[in-house]
Image (tube, grey):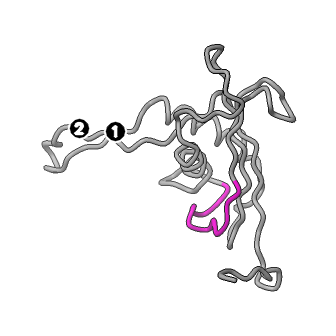
Amino acid sequence: MGEPFPWSAPTLGGINPKTGKRTCYQSTKLKKWQSEIRSQVVHLERMIDGPLILRIQVYATQPPSNKDFYPITKPDLDNQVKSFLDAIRDQKGIKGIIKDDNRIIDTVSKKRWAHQRPTYQGFPGIDFSLEIVREEDENETFGK
């Protein structure tokens, strides 16, 4: 998968002379990274649907100049998670493994250096799991 790539808002372009609407462009680096993600996860035989729990670990390369134990640097973890979710969801003509990222009801996310990765140690990337939640399994109480 390579170095995790953060989500970024589309860039506004010029006005389309045929439609009169402003065009938007997504980063080509982001599109390429998301395409790589899709190519590695679309081997699932069916789409996962229903309420889901996402557990995700993002592993980045530690620059030699950065001596921090944790990667408390840009890009932000939430943008990397959003980029990943956009890559695995169904989109206009692109098959995903989840119908929509609104199916995620709970998230556990971590950002670490690639050398701290338990598998593929030293290689940047993303490890994740999705768990389908059934109503009878939901025993957690909030607000106590």
Q: Residues within 10 Å of mark 1 (few under 14, many from 20)?
A: few
Q: Is residue 16 above or below residue 97?
A: above
Q: Is label 2 in a helix, a strand or a loop?
A: strand
Which badge, 1 or 2, is on the more N-terminal residue?
Answer: 2
Q: Is residue 9 above or below residue 31?
A: below
Q: Alpha carbon of mark 1 to alpha carbon of mark 2: how far? A: 7 Å
The one of 15 and 144 positioned closer to us in this rendering = 144
Identify which residue is drawn at 76% across, 43% down. Answer: 127
Q: Mark 2 belongs to which amino acid? A: Gly
Q: How crowded is mark 2: few (under 14 residues within 10 Å), some or many (20 or more)?
A: few
- For residue 32: magenta? no
Residue 50: mark in rendering: none
**From this viewpoint, which residue is outermost toward the right?**
118
Disc 1 + disc 2, Cβ < 8 Å? yes
Q: Mark 1 belongs to which amino acid? A: Tyr
Q: What stretch is highlighted in magenta?
A: 97-108
Task: Give the quadrant of the C terminus.
Answer: bottom right
From the top left corner, tell me how far across and down residue 97 is, in percent.
67, 55
Identify which residue is drawn at 64% across, 33% down. Answer: 71
Q: In this view, does 136 lie above or below 75?
A: below
Please name the residue that numbered disc 1 is placed on.
Answer: 25
Q: Is label 1 in a helix, a strand or a loop?
A: strand
**Location of residue 137 (image quadrant):** bottom right
From the top left corner, tell me how far across and down residue 131 is, in percent.
78, 64
The one of 24 and 84 positioned closer to us in this rendering = 84
**Location of residue 80 (image quadrant):** top right
Residue 13: mark in rendering: 2
Q: Along the horizontal axis of the image, is 2 left or right of 30?
A: right
Q: Along the horizontal axis of the image, is 23 left or right of 83?
A: left
Identify which residue is drawn at 49% across, 42% down. Answer: 7
